Image: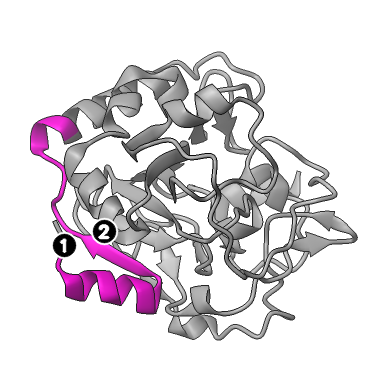
Amino acid sequence: MISQQDVDFYHEQGYVVVKNAVEPEMLSRLRQAVSEILAGARGLTAHNDIYDLEPTHQPNDPRVRRIKTPHIHFSVFREFARYAPMVEVLKQLLGPSGVRLHGSKINIKASEYGAPVEWHQDWAFYPHTNDDLTAVGVMLDDCTLENGPLMIVPGSHRGDTFNHHQDGYFCGAMDPKADGIDYSKAVPLVAPAGSLSFHHVRVVHGSAQNTSSRSRTLLLYEFAAADAWPLAGVPNYAAFNDRLVAGEPTYVPRLTPVPVRMPMPAAPKQGSIYENQSVFKNKYFAITGEAKKAALT
């Protein structure tokens, strides 16, 4: 799926994009599943185990910003976690020990109000014994400059693990007034629907509000090398191994000298990164229009 030059670019810059990697029939199945799931949000009055709702959500006018752990709740997303073209790229990026699914979600930036995500590193949420982890963005819509694409700070995965705490608690966001990052160098990951993006677990990234008339739906999977073990522990070894999509189980973690900060004490608001970041004071991304009014109420 990708060349050695692409692999080298990923390790140097912290990301790589593979355009038009998903077969049209599979893309159609994924998009249809999302539409059916979103229809199920009608009547909801609060977040639950599947739906994370926009502040502007109303039971008779459902607005969803995230579908949580779709690989657990819906078979097509469990199937796609083993999609052969994607797994082949993962094997190239994560090394010879194998590949394990860590988690999944679907971030939905609906037209004109889809919520931003503040700058952060995924590594801050789930540090492991080594940092051979990556997130795959499956672009279910065209990702354009206008509809809030994922933005990456190239090379930032080779630096520090930044502070994601506020007032002594984890909040899942980096302070743009204190972290010293030049965000003008951020690169938007724009590509047509059916493309895949891969970004390193330590790379700094975020995304702005969708102010366009076109939606931006991004299916996200987090994958780890099979010999990367979560520092928070493995509560169920059998379930841990069931998430292998390549390679064999191992009980010998690979330890590397990576900078770690633990996401503790836990964020005051739990449920998703949106909830974690809702208490964050020094926000970088602007919120406009109807979404701004809802945020102020």
Residue nearer the viewer, 20 or 116: 20
Query: Is 33 drawn above or below residue 284 in the view shown?
Result: above
* Quarter of the rendering containing residue 119: bottom right
Query: Is 22 within the magenta?
Result: yes
Q: Is residue 220 in view from this perspective? A: no
Amino acid type at mark 2? Gln
- Asked which secondary structure carries label 1, the reply is loop
Q: Quadrant of the C terminus?
A: top right
The residue lying at 60 percent from left, 83 percent from top is: 181
Q: Which residue is mark 2?
A: 92
- Residue 258 position in % (x across, y down): 61, 69
- Residue 64 position in % (x across, y down): 50, 33
Query: Is 12 drawn above or below residue 138 in the view shown?
Result: below
- First along the sequence among labels 2 and 1: 1
Q: Quadrant of the N terminus?
A: bottom left
Image mark for residue 2:
1
- Residue 226 position in % (x across, y down): 44, 45
Circle 1 packing at 10 Å, graded few (<14), some (14-19), many (20+), is: some
Query: Is 52 drawn above or below residue 143 in the view shown?
Result: above
Image mark for residue 174:
none
- Residue 62 position in % (x across, y down): 50, 25
Residue nearer the viewer, 64 or 257: 257
Query: Is 286 within the magenta?
Result: no
Indicate which label's residue lies in the foreground, 2 or 1: 2
Q: Which residues are magenta?
A: 2-26
Residue nearer the viewer, 49 or 108: 49
Q: Residue furthest right?
A: 167
The residue lying at 55 percent from left, 49 percent from top is: 253
The residue lying at 60 percent from left, 61 percent from top is: 118
- Asked which secondary structure carries label 2, the reply is helix
* Quarter of the rendering containing residue 34: top left
Circle 2 packing at 10 Å, graded few (<14), some (14-19), many (20+), is: some
